[in-house]
């Protein structure tokens, strides 16, 4: 068993092309694995085109491998598979270690990239939360609407949220000539029958921004801020090994999550307009008994800004 000091691979090089390996003064293209020993990996490569293995007995073409320092001071590139064949466990240990090192290096890199812009991101989040009709306003307004909506209407709104923007309709009672005509042509009424009252289905426009009921802007902003702060405070050297990949995930997604938050706040603004709120009464599959509650809805009733200021 080989015990490697982490320092042994601290300065591992990622070679960009074969030329950058072959042009090194001590590079050898013909190393005899029977006559030498490996000292330590000094670099790693992964190319789009195959290159020849530097072992004399091999010279097979491969995409990736390690550049290794040999006992006599030379350097050789070794394909990842043949390395194991010729040097056995020793190479396996190197390869695993290099892989761990490279993964760690890329995690730290992406975390550092987030740390560099985290202040700006947090500033933008704060802005999105506190601005007029922003995240905080949406939290209150959504809560107020939720309190006023009957359960079936709330469910209908959630269904709409999953489908995105939805067109809503109203069945308007038709009478006189139009109704006679409909009956004459055997058209079915709103309940599928051929007799009784006849209805015409009329569009009442589109309910926009309903996606905030599938993903709430307020909690999206809050959880992104919490996650970014956790990365900002992370000590990349001393932290437990498991924290690094998680933090790297957060870091890699921070930008797109922020864009999603922007879009959600914008959707919230589009949802909470007087027109849009008035359209909620036409949501499909809402019980007749819920109608009065829906018909009494208005933005001024649910938006916090419209409420009477509380006494200090
Ligand atoms: Zn080889």
Image (cartoon, helix red, strand yellow):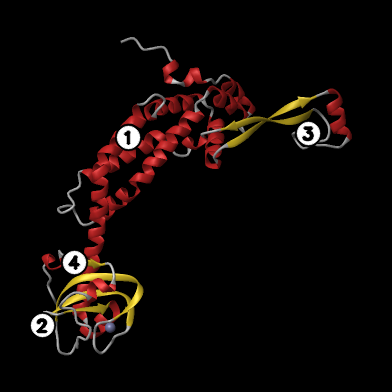
Looking at the image, in which quadrant does ligand 1 appear?
bottom left
- The answer for how far apart the CA atoms under marks 4 and 1 are is 37 Å
Name the one closer to the observer, 41 or 157. Answer: 41
Instruction: Name the element at disc 1.
Output: helix
Please give the residue where the numbered disc 4 appears in the rendered image: 12
Please give the residue where the numbered disc 1 appears in the rendered image: 124
Q: Residue at x 14, y 86 (%)?
A: 36
Q: Residue at x 35, y 45 (%)?
A: 255
- The answer for how far apart the CA atoms under marks 2 and 4 are is 19 Å
Q: Residue at x 84, y 28 (%)?
A: 179
Instruction: Name the element at disc 3.
Output: loop
- The answer for how far apart the CA atoms under marks 1 and 3 are is 53 Å
Please give the residue where the numbered disc 3 appears in the rendered image: 189
From what the image shows, is residue 108 above or below residue 30? above
- The answer for how far apart the CA atoms under marks 3 and 2 are is 93 Å
Please give the residue where the numbered disc 2 appears in the rendered image: 72
Q: Nearer the viewer, mark 4 or mark 3?
A: 4
- The answer for how far apart the CA atoms under marks 1 and 2 are is 57 Å
């Amino acid at each position: 068993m080989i015990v490697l000091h982490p320092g042994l691979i601290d300065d591992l090089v990622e070679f960009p092309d074969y030329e950058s390996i072959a042009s090194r003064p001590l590079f050898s293209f013909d190393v005899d694995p029977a006559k030498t020993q490996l000292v330590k990996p000094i670099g790693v490569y992964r190319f789009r085109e195959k290159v020849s293995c530097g072992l004399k007995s091999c010279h097979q073409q491969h995409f990736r491998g390690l550049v290794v320092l040999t006992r006599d001071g030379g350097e050789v590139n070794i394909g990842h598979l043949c390395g194991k064949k010729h040097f056995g466990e020793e190479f396996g240990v190197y390869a695993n270690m290099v892989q761990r090192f490279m993964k760690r290096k890329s995690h730290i890199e992406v975390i550092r990239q987030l740390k560099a812009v985290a202040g700006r991101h947090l500033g933008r989040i704060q802005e999105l939360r506190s601005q007029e009709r922003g995240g905080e306003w949406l939290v209150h307004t959504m809560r107020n609407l939720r309190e006023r909506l009957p359960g079936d209407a709330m469910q209908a709104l959630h269904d709409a949220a999953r489908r995105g923007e939805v067109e809503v309709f109203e069945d308007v009672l038709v009478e006189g000539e139009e109704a006679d005509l409909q009956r004459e042509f055997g058209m079915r009424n709103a309940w599928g029958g051929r007799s009784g009252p006849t209805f015409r289905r009329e569009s009442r426009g589109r309910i926009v921004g309903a996606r905030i009921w599938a993903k709430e802007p307020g909690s999206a902003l809050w959880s992104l801020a919490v996650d970014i702060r956790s990365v900002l405070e992370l000590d990349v050297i001393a932290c437990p090994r498991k924290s690094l990949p998680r933090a790297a995930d957060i870091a890699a997604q921070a930008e797109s999550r922020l864009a999603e938050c922007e879009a959600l706040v914008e959707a919230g603004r589009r949802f909470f307009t007087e027109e849009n709120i008035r359209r909620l009464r036409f949501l499909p599959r809402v019980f007749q008994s819920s109608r009065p509650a829906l018909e009494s809805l208005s933005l001024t009733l649910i938006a916090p800004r419209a409420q009477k200021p509380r006494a200090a």
